[in-house]
Image (tube, helix red, strand yellow):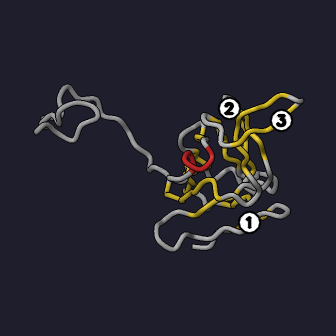
Amino acid sequence: MKIRVKYFQGSTKLKKIKMGNWIDVYANKDVFIKVGERAMIPLGFALELPQGWEAHLAPRSSTFKTWGIIQTNSVGVVDDTYIGDNDQWHMPIYCLQGKHIEFLDEVEQSGTWIRKGDKIGQFRIMEVMPEIEFQEVESFGNDNRGGFGTTGVK
């Protein structure tokens, strides 16, 4: 499958990771985020996803450990209509833990620096869910698994 990509000035090129099924994304500008604040980190590219496909954008497993940030929407979903020339992807983040100290307006601020080129997230593309119709029933006739959040009871 070929997907057209448009890069914004100075961005890091996309490439699939060698071990795994995700594609790393990189910050496209330096941003300082204070603890307790949020920011939209530009990723430096736009994609023309094929019709019927969507992308799921998520933090890397090391994102919180490295920068003390979380993605505000847990997983971002980019659908196949976000394909304009200026539809640059962004990663919405929230700073929970300061990794750096800066003096802003002569006041010491705890926060974290995201630097241009930092590998802060990843995405994969998937086919969208097919058309479905819900059929209401009184019972499924199946065994219960043991409650929400469990794979069974020992």
Measure the C-alpha gap from mark 1 to mark 3.
Answer: 29 Å
Q: Left or right of 22: which side holds 95? A: right
| Picture layout, residue 152 above or below residue 126 | above
Residue farthest toward the right in the current orientation of the protein:
105
Q: Determine which residue is flagged by label 1.
A: 12
The amino acid type of the residue labelled 1 equals Thr
Q: Determine which residue is flagged by label 3.
A: 103
Looking at the rendered structure, which numbered label has been put on residue 153? none
Provide residue 100's location: percent of width, then percent of height: 71, 42
Front-lying residue, 50 or 121: 121
Measure the C-alpha gap from mark 2 to mark 1.
Answer: 27 Å
Q: Left or right of 16: which side holds 108? A: right
Q: Determine which residue is flagged by label 2.
A: 35
The amino acid type of the residue labelled 2 equals Val
Provide residue 152's location: percent of width, then percent of height: 17, 39
Q: Residue at x 69, y 61 (%)?
A: 48
Q: What secondary structure is found at the residue carrying circle 2?
A: loop
**Label 2 or label 1, whichever comes before in sequence order:** 1
**Label 2 or label 3, whichever comes before in sequence order:** 2
Provide residue 137's location: percent of width, then percent of height: 23, 29
Q: Where, quadrant-wise, is the C terminus in this rendering?
A: top left
Q: What secondary structure is found at the residue carrying circle 1?
A: loop
Measure the C-alpha gap from mark 2 to mark 3.
Answer: 14 Å
Q: Where, quadrant-wise, is the N terminus in this rendering?
A: bottom right
**Label 1 or label 3, whichever comes before in sequence order:** 1
The amino acid type of the residue labelled 3 equals Phe
Q: Residue at x 17, y 36 (%)?
A: 145
